[in-house]
Amino acid sequence: MLRRIPFRVAAHTLLLLFAAAIAFQLVVIAGFIPTEMVWGGRLKNEQERTVGALVSIAFLVLFALLVLARMGRVMHTIPEIGKWGMWLVCALFALNTIGNLVALDQRETLIFTPITLISTVLAARVAVGE
């Protein structure tokens, strides 16, 4: 079933989603997104929000590098890192989907649950490879 999604489409879509998520995290850092709408609504102050957003950005950059590795664009000498790394990304997105379902803020649940579910499927497709 996963192979019905073209590998390149899945990889490029994930990269686009990661770029959008990084942009979103920058907007979070700038304070334009309510603190209760991120990290399951469990952050207590602006400092926690900033740290959470910076951690998210670091992970998103790492995830993008893993997609690029799976595409053969970086880390040519160790292709297994891309493969197993993408399975880890898939698992993390699956857990994040569950987390979004139990978020305290309804907006987070409604907006981000479908995005993380789609990201889970796309990450699995990229992990499978061409």
Image (cartoon, helix red, strand yellow):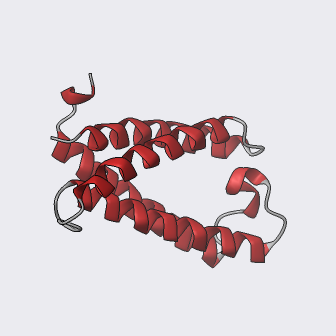
The residue lying at 34 percent from left, 40 percent from top is 122
Q: Residue at x 82, y 71 (%)?
A: 45
Question: What percent of the width, then of the height, locates residue 79?
Answer: 23, 57
Residue pushed farthest top?
Answer: 1
Quadrant of image for the C terminus = top left
Question: Residue 119: which quarter of the image?
Answer: top left
**Relative to the observer, which residue lies in front, 58 or 20?**
58
Q: To which quarter of the image does residue 102 belong?
A: top right
Q: Quadrant of the N terminus?
A: top left
Residue displayed at 76% across by 77% down: 47
Q: Whole-percent x and y of residue 14?
A: 33, 51
Q: How many marks?
A: 0
Left or right: residue 26 compared with residue 104: left
Q: Nearer the viewer, residue 52 or 80?
A: 80
- Could you say which quadrant of the image residue 104 lies in? top right
Nearer-the-camera pick, 73 or 98? 73
Q: Is residue 6 above or below residue 19?
A: above
Judged left or right of residue 124, residue 60 is right
Residue 67: x, y in percent? 29, 56
Figure check: 101 above or below 96: above
Instruction: Kindly identify the residue that appears in the image at 48 percent across and 36 percent down.
Output: 117
Q: Is residue 59 above or below residue 113?
A: below
Residue 76 appears left or right of 87: left
Residue 35 lies, in percent from the top left, at: 74, 63
